[in-house]
Amino acid sequence: MNEIPDDLIKKAASGDIEAFEEIYRSFSAFVFRVVLRVTQNTHDAEEVTQDVFVKVFNSLKNFGFRSQFKTWVYRIAVNLAINKYKASSRERKRNLDIDEVGDLVSTQEDATKSVERQEFKEQADILLARLNPEMRACVVLREMEGLDYKEIAETLNIPINTVRSRLKRAREALMAHAERQVVKHEV
Amino acid sequence: MKCNRVRELIMTDYRDREVDAGAKEEVLAHLTWCSECRALEKRLNLVSSRLRSAKRPVPPERVWTNIRARISEEKPAFFRPLISPAPAVNVLWDRIRSLVLTPRFLAGKLALAAVMVAVVIGVYAHIQRGGHAALFGEEALIMTASESADDLNYDLGTDVEKYFL
């Protein structure tokens, strides 16, 4: 993805919606894909993508041109996606606790539905679901979006060695899960 | 290169094209004779291909529609001129706006603002001196002293205060 011209950023920062739409068109697909993979939910991904670009628009006047614009946008996207995933997980856990007390009969039915949902889910999402959101973001940026270690480190605001160790641990976990799935199918 | 090092690189830098040419050659040479490390690379390739074969969705158009609506709602007042300016004025307005809003030359802008504030304070102080010159000097000291003396006449109503006063 090419870097956005400074003039376009300045125009958008002064409130020019057309200039901002051009920025949105350049980044929206990347932002949406990353957010979708991290949140694992289409509705949340749409909501977070909106939040990302509203935040970018409101913060444009503070953008100091010290870092790359795209890295700045990626960082906002990944941070909001991780926060959303954590908030949604807490919410789901609360609801699950309530359901466990109130509705024990439907457990078998829900389990069947869950398996059906899994079958329609993409292989990639099933694998990514095994990782915590920080590792997931790292894997998505490297494996699915092709960022190099330096870009990932800048986006996640972590040292390059942390990128390296997160990728290693994530890959070990993914390989272990893939092998368990193979054994399960064979049985 | 030993298996442990090769496996470390297969899981990270070698796979992600972050190794230099020398290390890459060493890993490749190791893989030609080590079947265990080759098997590890194959397993990793399998996982990686599953991730890379995922669909690449784009956001629906309603996402931009909603963003645009939210921006228009939240847009601060200083982005909107009160009346629609004529084209020549529009250019001037844009220049002033970008000059004030962009973070460039921030130090210069702050220095200019500080000078303006200092000038306003100076003018204000000058006017004050002209009107109440008597307050600066001996009379002011006498006035302050007498005000302080008046304070001593207050009865604060506690034993401790009576003792000291």
Image (cartoon, rainbow, N blue to C red):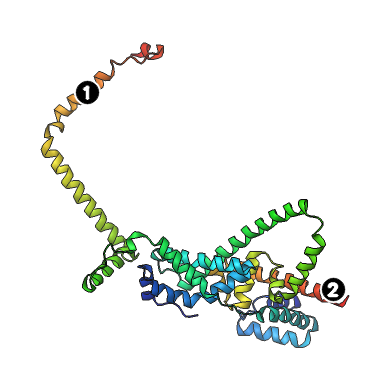
**Which element is circle 2 on?**
helix
Task: Give the image location of residue B76, x and y in percent.
Answer: 37, 60
Is any atom of residue A93 visible in this view?
Answer: yes
Front: mark 2 or 1: 2
Q: Return the residue nearer the eye: B85 or A36.
A: B85
Task: Give the image location of residue B132, x and y in percent.
Answer: 13, 34
Crowding near pointer 1: few (<14 within 10 Å), some, many (20+)?
few
Residue at x 43%, y 66% (from the top left corner):
A57
Taking the view exactly as shown, the residue that stands out farthest to the right is A187
Image quadrant holding the N terminus of chain B, namely: bottom right
Residue at x 62%, y 68% (from the top left corner):
A38
Q: Is residue B4 left or right of A47 when viewed as pictured?
A: right
Q: Amino acid at mark 1?
A: Ala
Q: Amino acid at mark 2?
A: Lys
Identify residue for label 2: A184
Q: Give the quarter of the image for residue A42.
A: bottom right
Against B25, is B8 above or below? above
Q: Give the quarter of the image for residue A35.
A: bottom right
Disc 2 with disc 1 on a shared chain? no
**Label 1 marks which chain's residue?**
B
Task: Give the image location of residue A132, x and y in percent.
Answer: 67, 64
- Marks 2 and 1 sit apart, C-alpha to C-alpha, by 94 Å
Residue at x 69%, y 82% (from the top left corner):
B49
Q: Is residue A63 left or right of B119 when viewed as pictured?
A: right
Task: Give the image location of residue B88, x and y in percent.
Answer: 21, 73
Q: Is residue A37 left or right of B40 when viewed as pictured?
A: left
Q: Return the residue nearer the eye: A113 or B8.
A: A113
**Label 2 marks which chain's residue?**
A
**Which element is circle 1 on?**
helix
Identify residue for label 1: B145
